[in-house]
Amino acid sequence: MNHEKEAHFTSVGTNINEVKQKNADAGLSYNEVKALLAKSGGQGTAIYSDTDIEEVKQDIHKHQQ
């Protein structure tokens, strides 16, 4: 018996594997969207950004000279 294909149900009858598959097919997760917005400059996403602020400041300073 293949456990990957075997249906697993919650106590109220929800098919867990079906829900997982639908979630996988649905697109980006909430956290993936936050990360994408932070990298693309979304407004109010600075806390999620991995941008090195000091590096940006140095780059700006170099271009102003």
Image (cartoon, helix red, strand yellow):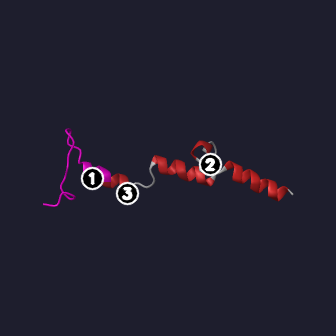
Check disc 2: other Cα within 10 Å, few if <14, some if 14-19, many if 20+.
few
- Residue type, label 2: Gly
Is 38 located above or below residue 63 in the figure?
A: above
Residue 2: mark in rendering: none
Query: Residue 15: where, in percent of width, then height?
Result: 23, 48
Q: Amino acid at mark 3?
A: Asp
Q: Residue at x 57, y 45 (%)?
A: 48
Left or right, 16 with respect to 51, comes to: left
Q: Residue at x 75, y 56 (%)?
A: 59
| Label at residue 42 | 2
The magenta-colored residue range is: 1-20
Q: Nearer the viewer, mark 2 or mark 1?
A: 2
Identify which amino acid the numbered label 1 is placed on.
Answer: Glu
Which comes sooner in the sequence, label 2 or label 1? 1
Q: Nearer the viewer, residue 56 or 43?
A: 56
Circle 1 sits on which residue? 18
C-alpha span from label 3 to label 1: 11 Å
Q: Earlier in the sequence, mark 3 or mark 1?
A: 1
